[in-house]
Amino acid sequence: MPLFKRNPFGHILFLKKWLIRIFGIVSHGRYRKFNNLQIEGSENLKNLPDSKVLFIANHQTYFADVAAMYHVFNASLSGRDDSIKNIGYIWKPKLNVYFVAAGETMRSGILPKIFAYMGSVSIERTWRSGGKDVKRQVKNSDISNIGKAINDGWVITFPQGTTTPFRPIRRGTAHIIKTYKPIVVPIVIDGFRRSFDKKGLNIKKRNVLQSMVIKEPLEIDYENESIADIVTKIEFAIEQHKSFLKVLSVKELEELTKEEEELNKKRTFWSS
């Protein structure tokens, strides 16, 4: 690989590789030491093509979700099954992994800008800006950039566009699926909201059981399924359909909290 080879967005791959290595090493303990990430379904990653893959997931923090996926993807591709043990996999990371993120988030400081270089496809949200609800037109350049990333590699997107659970799926994700026809792989995560702050940069609580379930690719009829059909399929696939929402009684909530505390006592700080 030439030293200054660039990806379709102009990022130097040599620099991107070193950034992923450095931040991979720094972040590894967040999922292996301070908390325990349990992975299910990593075998579904191994037979995917090198490009034209779209990962859809629920969203709990700005950055910790994506960082965990980078770890799981690279660990799986290096032969690990449902494990990110032994960080040697980060030495040869997959460089054509991207994630869709709000432009204002990725411009909010030096650290987000570095994260952006590692793989962000920044878009301008049409429904929210500066913490306020807005309504504006979709930028064609944003759509084309997502398509460019899909054609080049693997793309992670959070179709709800927010870390708030059970919010509606943005129809734009369904339009992208029908337009670019990628393989669509659902991912369901949990525990990140409890263990990290909203940005996903600071550890809020230790010894939390985090989980990531990688499901089999969705079966989608790109030509005949409607946008509404695909939106519904996404809702169920990432377990954000209203049918997954259960209102707990005070007693059930207390029992659930007590059960989680008991489980946390059993998890040692250096759990494997």
Image (spheres, rainbow, N blue to C red):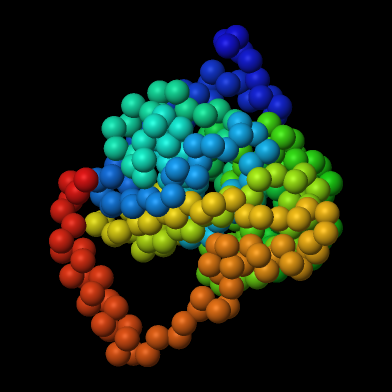
Residue 110 in view (yes/no):
no
Q: Position of residue 157 (x, y in %)?
A: 61, 50
Q: Position of residue 145 (x, y in %)?
A: 75, 39
Q: In the shown orientation, is residue 17 left or right of residue 135?
A: left
Residue 146 versus residue 238 in the image, above or below: above
Q: Nearest the camera: 223 or 53?
A: 223
Task: Tell me if residue 41 comes above or below residue 111 in the rendering.
Answer: below
Question: In this orientation, which residue lies closer to the viewer: 211 or 127?
Answer: 211
Image spot of residue 135 (x, y percent): 79, 65
Q: Is residue 3 above or below residue 10?
A: above
Residue at 83% x, 54% y: name it.
Answer: 223
- 49 relative to 140 in the view: left or right: left
Q: Give the percent coordinates (x, y) of residue 10.
A: 69, 24
User: Is 242 left or right of 32, judged from the image as shown?
Assistant: right
Q: Residue at x 44, y 55 (%)?
A: 213
Quarter of the image that includes the N terminus = top right
Residue 81 occupies which quadrant of the picture? top left
Q: Residue at x 59, y 51 (%)?
A: 217
Which quadrant is home to the C terminus?
top left
Q: Nearer the viewer, residue 14 or 262?
A: 262
Across the whole image, how many numbered discs are drawn on residues? 0
Asked which quadrant contains residue 175, the reply is bottom right
Q: Is residue 141 visible?
A: yes
Residue in the picture at 18% in, 70% down = 262
